[in-house]
Amino acid sequence: MPTSKTTWENIIDIEDAWSRTENKTMEKVQLIKVLMQNIKTLDSFFKDKDLRNIYDEMEDIVKKHEDMITKDINDVMNKLYDWGDQTGSTENSRKCFIKA
């Protein structure tokens, strides 16, 4: 678990998209598309196999039918949070803060 001295190597800010999804003014599949756009901007996108696997899962979700999406989104978000909480390049850094 990150300490108060934790630094984040990246930040993915999806707070607005998350809020619009919660308020049902944005479809969940659009939230995943916003996440995918943000992930592709990270320096580690092409270097980190785990992040690339999460991205690939998101691509699969976008292709699925809406009824199946909620469980899939929860699963992939948990994986993204776990990836972001991994130790970064230094002991007190973490890979990415997911602001939702």
Image: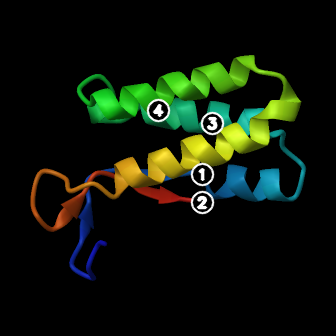
Residues at badges 2 and 4 in contact (C-beta under 8 Å)?
A: no
Residues at badges 3 and 4 in contact (C-beta under 8 Å)?
A: no
**Dot 2: element:** loop
Residue 34: assigned label: 3
**Dot 3: element:** helix
User: How dense is the environment of label 2, judged by Cα within 10 Å: few (below 14), some, or many (20 and up)?
Assistant: few
**Dot 1: element:** loop
Residue 14: assigned label: 1
Q: Earlier in the sequence, mark 3 or mark 1?
A: 1
Q: Identity of the amino acid at label 2?
A: Ala
Give the distance between the C-alpha atoms of the residues marked 1 and 2, in whole angstroms.
5 Å
Q: Earlier in the sequence, mark 2 or mark 3?
A: 3
Residues at badges 3 and 1 in contact (C-beta under 8 Å)?
A: yes
Q: Is 71 positioned to the left or the right of 80 in the image?
A: right
User: Which residue is at 40% across, 53% downward?
Assistant: 82
Residue 54: assigned label: 4
Residue 11 point in image, percent of width and height: 40, 53
Residue 40 point in image, percent of width and height: 43, 28
